[in-house]
Image (cartoon, grey):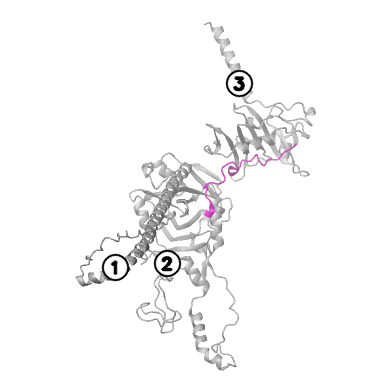
Amino acid sequence: MTETRKTFLFVGATLIVLAVAWWVRYVPPAGDVGDMRGKVLFPSFSNALDAASLEITEYDPNSVGIKTFKVAQVNNRWSIPSHDNYPADAKDHLAQAATSLIGLTVLDVAASSPTQEELAMFGVVTPDPDKTTLGTRGIGKRVIMRDAGDRVLVDIILGNKLKDDPQLRYVRVSGQDPVYVVKLSDDKLSSNFGDWIEKDLLKLNPWDVKDVQLHDYSFDSLTSGIEPRSQIVLKYDDLGNPRWSLSQDLAFDPQSMSWKPRSLADDEELDTAKLDALRTAVDDLKIVDVRKKPEGLSASLSSDGSFATNQEALADLQRAGFFATSAGQFYRIFPPLGSRKIDMNGVEIISSEGEIRVGMKDGVRYLLRFGRILEGQGGDAESGSDQNVNRFLLVTAEFDPQLIPEPELEPLPDLPPEQAAPSEPQAGETQNTAPDNATAQADETGESKADEGQDGSQAEKPAGEAAEKKAEDVKAERERIEKENQRKRDEYQEKLKKGEERVKELNARFAEWYYIISDEVYRKIRLSRQDIVKKKEATPPASGTPSENGGATPEETPAEKESQPAAEDSSANETQSPPPAAESTESQNGKMRAPEPPSEGASPGGTDSPPSEGGRDESGGASQTPGSADTQGDTTPGEASVP
């Protein structure tokens, strides 16, 4: 091959590459300025389904710089490449965004050859990260749409809205000078991450919430010290009244290094409004961003400790505010709740700002662990002065079979004893061996006995048939009950199986990501005891309260005087009984109370002596019955014991 031929081949290849590059970066011509009024800016873009990607570049006041957001199909799945290919809910959204740009018609020409000052005034300055400085004004929003072949369909810079008509705005085709006026809404042209993702992160039904565990603690990475404060378990019953109840309330005592049970005071009650807001916030958990976890972090961190040897993974966890520790050490401080499987030789995660666990009726328990404030965020996290403060959130799921109630099986009825034949003697009986005179007497009355025997045999026949029918009915009922009980067992096993599969599915979804939540969401779901307990509202005394003189009226009839002792007993009983609201709160809360000293006038030995009539003991004090508020509430296996 001659040198000349080589040169021609090289030049030809170069021209082909340039042609391809021009085609990829091609922007449909806008035509002459004088001809553009009433014409479409991008006439070749007519089908919204041709749009396969969207890229938006604009100024971000939070980061004080230019940010780029992109959504596209990656490996046949809608993803957000600008956010580590996080799954996007973009098919319909992108089609709507594309539709807003199809047929975009020029209404007027604002400037044919604008100056830099005019570009800033119209808000159509190109958002270029290499040329934009802190003092650059009038930066616009650049929108680029491409098809599946990466060919540019639209490349436009959106500017300010017109003051007289907010439906109109200034726009400029990238790479061209003229500034046009068009009618355009950019609602679907959003670079907000939350607008392009699945809104239902946890995919839970708020009415299926069964309990909420609040683990209030903090971890200081500098001193490697953990500060436990409280462990609270709240039961939720969507059909109950009230729906929320306090099942466990433990406070950590730093002096004895142990958990102490406590209860609501007489003037305290649960703040159900705060608890309802927590349930709603968990259901509608809004994330503002994501960060991808490094390789080595498993879907369920507590079930696989292999990442503990990966220093890169551990360092990444710590930067987000999560720290690996021995499961044995962790559960020595925080006694496990429920009946989930725990490997004490495994690894657990300590969060810098505690955690909550939400149990569902299907056996799934969501673990929400709260990490550090995102680096680069300003504001005072303690005072909540900056609404732009964001925080890391680690989400996992685990299966707790205790959340699924075991089936209530119906007992089987007893089979009736088999009836012996009339001709056979019963056990312990002997044949009749009467003397001859008895036989002669029987002969004299033989005719009457025969008649009676005939009547007896006729009576025994229906009785035997009835007994046989009853036995068959009992057997049939037993078979029905056995089938129904087996159906309940199979249904229960199916629920357990579905719950375990659901946990695997959720953990696969949460596996790769740290989630970023706003401080507003954080403060709704990360609650402490002082957040969920409030003072009872004062209620006015009921009308007709007895006066200080014992309730006696100035004039009493003999009948009234005669019935006065009974009335006094009734009044005293009502006065010394706990107020209805307090009694209801304690019984509904199911809380565990610490042992209290016996009240004045109580008999030695507590409740050993039987109460007198009217529910009162002989000394006049209110009697105590088993199952009162002094008994321990719902304590599941593995919970801290009451000292």
Spot occupied by residue 459 in the image (x, y as percentages of width and height): 37, 63
As drawn, the label of residue 68 is: none
Which comes sooner in the sequence, label 1 or label 3? 3
Q: Is residue 77 above or below residue 408?
A: above
Reading the image, the residue beneath label 1 is: 446
Which comes sooner in the sequence, label 3 or label 2? 3
Reading the image, the residue beneath label 2 is: 592
Q: Tag 2, which secondary structure? A: loop
* Label 3 – label 2 distance at C-alpha: 76 Å
Reading the image, the residue beneath label 3 is: 20
Label 3 with label 2: CB-CB less than 8 Å: no
Q: Is residue 171 left or right of residue 386?
A: right
Viewer-nearest residue: 209 or 214:
209
Q: Which residues are magenta?
A: 182-207
One can see residue 222 in this view? no
Q: Is residue 130 left or right of residue 477?
A: right
Which quadrant of the structure image shows residue 157? Answer: top right
